[in-house]
Every structure is written in structure tokens, then in C-alpha cells.
Image (spheres, rainbow, N blue to C red):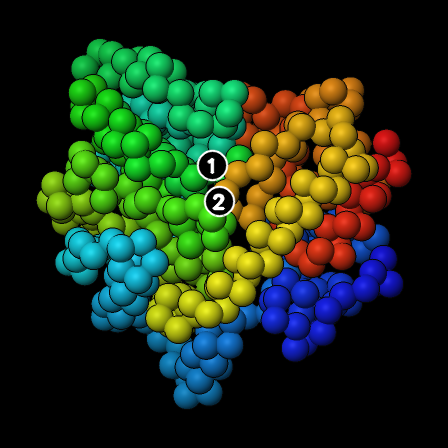
Amino acid sequence: MEQIPHGSPDDPNPLRRLSLEQLRRRTSIKWREYPADVLPLWVAEMDVPLAGPVARAVTDAVAIGDTGYPSGTGYAEALASFASDRWGWDTIAVERTRLVPDVMLGIVEVLKLITDPGDTVVVNCPVYNPFYLFVEHMQRRVVEAPFDRRARIDPTALEEAFRQAVRDGRRAAYLLCSPHNPTGTVHTAAELAAVAALADRHGVRVVADEIHAPVVSRSARFVPYLTVPGGERGFSLMSASKAWNLAGLKAALAIAGPAAAGDLERMPPEVGHGPSHLGVIAHTAAYRDGGAWLDAVLDGLDDNRRLLGELLAKHLPGVRHLPGDGTYLAWLDFRSLGLGDDPSAVLVERARVALHPGPPFGTGGAGHARLNLATSPEVLTEAVRRIADAL
Ligand SMILES: Cc1ncc(COP(=O)(O)O)c(C=O)c1O
């Protein structure tokens, strides 16, 4: 496998800069979960070197021993400036943000502000598995609103879930994934405005996980939930961790819409003890100075999306894939190949390729697997070739 050709340290595409040999020196879960002969295309880590400005900021901090507790509003200011440049979102007010340890723990803390134990949290499915795990761990109930056949929000299913959620007069929240993991769905402004209207009508509060927001195809547009009409009562969770591959440098921001500011003020100060100062430094540098690097990654991902479409058509025509414009994840439907509920279990054994199992993504996950596109075209090609050969 280490024979797979790859780019060079100077390749303009960050996804082609590292060899498999270099990547295998990593000790993160992507590279340690499976034996060395398995190509790992499962968890959402990217096969890229750190963006130069991020590496410099962290190295400089380490050089002067700047490894204490975080302080200040630099992270929120850097995000506000990035959001204005990228999405024309000019209304992130620093005083309506809170530093949180990471996106999932930020979601937990926001849900604590607006729901009680026993209340319901609505999710679209299939969806990122920790949405179920964290919500159930905090004694809330998950109600699913399945996507439609085109992997888009189904307003009828959502309304039915909202009705169920507020039955008995209980408080309820809707945990929106935007863009959506695993399908890559990028919600339109019209879809999000319809969500806001529906949520308002039923008294459901919206919490938008927008961690994948910067990772959207060049041909599509991410719309921040808090910018749509009716979005003012909502919350957004943002972080540089997915787009700049910083999951190991923990930090994220909770952002309240103008009509939710009072709720966010009730978040206890100790929540802000969770994020790491080095994480805040890294994320701040990413938003502030990492735009050119991100653009190069987005170009590489667009190429990989096209390549995956061609590879599947040629080598695996039985696999159904509805390409999404967001995230670096591809949601593959193996049901016509008869590999059972969890095709990834068969593929890791027979093809020595690790995809993420589909069933943990909830209803709609059986017979599916999630492939991580944030790798080199060479590794992607080899992975599809191995799967085709094995089947
Ligand atoms: C939709 C979504 N939310 C949250 C996370 C995890 O973010 P964090 O590590 O900041 O909790 C991920 C990671 O892949 C994700 O895809």
C-alpha cells in the first residue's frame, strides 16, 4: 500500500502533500484504529499537513511557553471577520458568543439552557451518530425527522416530529446539522427560512451545528441559520476544527441570535474553562489567516467529488451516491449489493478499506457507509479499486 503514488510537499493541493508513510506516523484514531494494511477513509480527519499560519501560531505559542488558560475575544472576532468575508454574515456580535470546549459539548450546554431532562431533541436522519449519543446521555429524548429521498429536509416529517416533541406542553429543540453530515446536504436559504417558521409555530428552539460551514463546494453557498428570517431565536455552533483539521486542538464558539442572547447569558462561566488555549490560538489563526489554504483544500475536494463520481460509475455501478455540496463526506448506498446492514464490516475484511459504518447514523443508515473524501486522489482511486476487486 505504501507504493501508492502521491504528490510532493510543494503540491498546490494540500490533500496531495503527504505520503501514506508520513500519515501512518500519526497517532490519531484515524490511523490507529485499523491494522496498517487497511486504507482508512472513515472518521472525519483530513490527510493534510497543518495550514502554515496555524502551524506557525501554535509553534510560536509553544516556543514562548504560552500554554496557560484562554482569554479574550480574539476567536470570536476572527470568526466574525471570516463570516463576513465568506458568507456576507455581518451580524456576529462578540457579546452574543461564548467560548465552549468543542462543538458537541457546546451543543450540550446550549441544550441545557433551553430544554429540561425528559424533553425532546429533534434530528434529521441519517445523521452524525454523536447527536444521538450526547443527547441521550443528557437525559433528553431523540425524535427523528427523516430526510426525503433527495437527502433534503422533509417539512412534513419535521412538522410531525415537532408536534410529537411539544406534546404534553414540554420544551423542545431541533438540532440542525448544516451542512449535513453524512449526506453533505447544503440547506438553502428558503429551506432554512421554512424551518424557522415551522419551529416558531410549534415553539421549538433551533440549534444549528455549523461546524462544516467552511467546507462547501465552490459551486454552492452556505447560508448561516442565524441570518435567515426567523433565525433570531436560534443558536449556532461553529469551530475551525473540521475545515482546518484541528480536532486535537479543542475549541469552539456558541453564538446566539439576537433574540436568544438572554438564554446564552445563563450559560455558566465554568463552561469556558473547557477549551484549550492552544486550541483557541490555532482556531483563531485558521479563521484569520487560513483562507488561502482552505481555498486550496476546497479545490482539491471538488476534484475528489468529481473523481469519486467517475470511479463509482466505472467500477461500482451498483453503489448509489447522491453527491452533496458540503462536508468532505460521501454517503454511499450499498443496498443493491447485498452486503447486509453494515457493508463497512464486509469491506474492511475483504477489501482492506475502512469506511464509517452506516447503522449508527440512525434510521436510513442500514446498508450504507460513509466515505471520507479528504485524502489524495491516489488513495481514493486505490480505495474504490480495492472495493471493486473485493466484490
Ligand atoms: C456535524 C458534526 N458536529 C460535531 C462534530 C465534532 O466536533 P467537535 O470535535 O468540535 O465536538 C463533528 C465531527 O466530525 C461533526 O461532523
Residue nearest the observer in this picture, 239 or 156: 156
369 on left or right of 250: right
Q: Which is nearer the eye, 244 or 221?
A: 221
Q: Residue at x 36, y 36 (%)?
A: 188
Question: Mark 1 vs ligand 1: CB under 8 Å?
Answer: no
Q: Report which quarter residue 343 is drawn in.
A: top right
Rendered position, 309 above or below 116: below
Q: What element does badge 2 sit on?
A: loop
Q: Which residue is mark 2?
A: 326
Q: Is residue 128 visible?
A: no
Which residue is labeled 1 in the image? 185
Placement of 66 over or under 193, stated as above or below? below
**Percent position (x, y) of residue 33?**
70, 50
- What secondary structure is found at the residue carrying circle 1? loop
The percent position of residue 265, horizontal first and vertical second, equals 14, 49
Apparent side of residue 283 relative to residue 365 in the rendered image (left or right)? left
The amino acid on which the numbered mark 1 sits, given as a three-letter code, is Thr
Tell me, yes or no, whether the two marked residues, 2 and 1, touch with CB atoms within 8 Å: yes
Q: Residue furthest bottom?
A: 64
Judge whether 38 appears above or below 73 on screen.
Answer: above
- Lower sequence index among marks 2 and 1: 1
Label 2 amino acid? Gly
Would residue 6 be visible to someone looking at this image? yes
* Residue located at (17% from left, 40% from top): 232
Instruction: Locate the N terminus and report the quarter of the image it occupies.
Output: bottom right
Left or right, 232 with respect to 184, comes to: left
Residue at 81 percent across and 37 percent down: it is 315
Q: Position of residue 174 (x, y in %)?
A: 31, 29
Query: Where is the C terminus found, in terms of image quarters?
Result: top right
> x%, y% of residue 191?
33, 30
Q: Residue furthest front?
A: 219
Q: CA distance from mark 2 to mark 1?
A: 6 Å
